[in-house]
Amino acid sequence: MENKSRIALWGAGALVVLGGAAFIGPSIYASQSEESVAEAPSITMSAPAASESPTAGTADNTQAHLAGTWQVSEGSQAGYRVDEVLNGENITVTGRTSDVTGTIKVNDKGTTLESASFTVDVTTIATDSERRDNYFRENTVKADQNPTATLNITQPVELGTPAAGETITVDVTGELTLAGVTQTVTFPVQVAGDGSQLQIAASVPLTFADYGIEAPSLGFVSVEETGAIEVQLTAVPAA
């Protein structure tokens, strides 16, 4: 299946430029765009105070707070981050959706992430511009043919021995499917859990050409050839 998009979603950004920046000026447009940029993914769970940390050999040190099967729940988000240059002004664009589903499986001891799979509804990813979003769906990912993007963790990951609520960072390898094309990706992931909730934050480096997406250069606006897929997930024990 042909998945190449000759003008990526930021070509739609050019439409926004024609409709907005052409009148208010690149500097003001860049400033306004930056105000709508989403924060990078992060863990919001707090680690326990030193006096509350479990000592070696206690039950909590078995990492039971990470063990089990987890299901992505409310409060989760996924999307993208890209940089473009408009008449010399650097602009960052972020798109987000809360339409994310998935499961994470950790072994009974809570020491190994055994598998994980996530699905994102790309038809609902939104930025600060409806025209950019429509172009993204229709021409970039061709959402009528590829309405979802998926990320599957394909190799077990050792989690170490974090305390409940403590954030750890591990390297993860998986398969990312975007615009109908699947590539193997390796990236760092932040993880924290306290037994009732699991949080995951990650930024997956992305080279658009690998997925048949060609970043445009339209003279007054150009887009970097790389970006990132970003996820900030909250998961609860599966029923």
Image (spheres, rainbow, N blue to C red):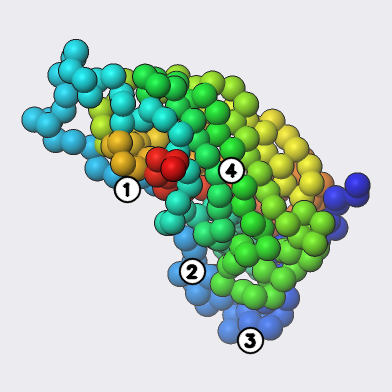
Which of the two labelled residues, at mark 3 and mark 4, occupies the earlier sequence position? 3
Give coordinates of residue 221: x percent, y percent: 71, 65
Residue at horizontal 58%, vertical 67%? 127
Which of the two labelled residues, at mark 3 and mark 2, occupies the earlier sequence position? 3
Q: Quadrant of residue 183?
A: top right
**Residue indicated by mark 3:** 23
Q: Which mark is residue 36?
A: 2
**Circle 2: element type:** loop
Q: Within 10 angstroms of label 2, few (less than 14), some, or many (20 or more) residues? A: some
**Residue indicated by mark 1:** 44
| Amino acid on which the number 1 mark rests in the picture | Thr
**Circle 1: element type:** loop
Contact (CB < 8 A) between labels 3 and 2? no
Q: Is residue 29 above or below residue 142?
A: below
| Amino acid on which the number 2 mark rests in the picture | Ser
Q: Which mark is residue 118?
A: 4
Contact (CB < 8 A) between labels 1 and 3? no
Q: Can residue 105 be seen by looking at this rendering? A: yes
Give coordinates of residue 99: x percent, y percent: 56, 58
> Residue 100 versus residue 17: which sits nearer the camera?
100
| Amino acid on which the number 4 mark rests in the picture | Phe
Residue at horizontal 75%, vertical 68%? 135
Q: Within 10 angstroms of label 4, few (less than 14), some, or many (20 or more) residues? A: some
Give the CA distance from mark 4 to mark 1.
20 Å
